[in-house]
Image: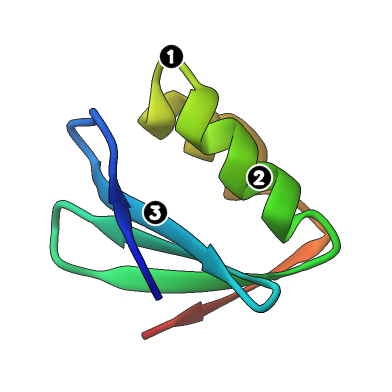
């Protein structure tokens, strides 16, 4: 999966492929998010003024997304 770097103090890069949103954090941890809103969340986090803030407000608690650590 191609990961795109983002300007954030908490998030290093994000990617999307085959229904999976992947977020790599500056801590070195990477998580995959799947569900009906994954593609939209990927598009929006790339456009967000703050990727970290967007993640906290819209991805972390999205009931449509299932999370797994990679």
Q: Tell me if 63 is positioned left or right of 19 in this view.
A: right
Marks 1/3 in contact by CB < 8 Å: the verdict is no
Image disc number at residue 49: 1
- The residue under the point 50% across, 39% down is 55
Most foreground residue, 1 or 38: 1
The image position of residue 32, as x and y in percent, is 50, 73
Query: Which quarter of the figure has residue 25?
Result: bottom left
Dot 2 lies on which element?
helix
Dot 3 lies on which element?
strand
- The residue under the point 61% across, 40% down is 43
Marks 2/3 in contact by CB < 8 Å: the verdict is no
- Please identify the quadrant where the N terminus is shown: bottom left
Colour scheme used in the picture?
Answer: rainbow
The image position of residue 66, as x and y in percent, is 69, 73
Query: How many numbered discs sit on the rendered protein?
Result: 3
Q: Which residue was labeled with disc 3?
A: 14
Q: Which residue was labeled with disc 2?
A: 41
Q: How far is mark 2 from mark 1, CA to CA?
A: 14 Å
The image position of residue 18, as x and y in percent, is 66, 78
Label 2 packing within 10 angstroms: few (<14), some (14-19), many (20+): many
Q: How far is mark 2 from mark 3, CA to CA?
A: 10 Å
């Amino acid at each position: 999966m191609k990961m795109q770097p983002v300007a954030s103090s908490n998030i290093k890069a994000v990617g999307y492929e085959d229904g999976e949103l992947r977020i790599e954090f500056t801590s070195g941890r990477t998580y995959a998010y799947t569900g009906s809103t994954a593609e939209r969340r990927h598009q929006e986090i790339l456009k967000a003024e703050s990727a970290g803030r967007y993640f906290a407000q819209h991805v972390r608690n999205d009931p449509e997304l299932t999370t797994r650590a990679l």
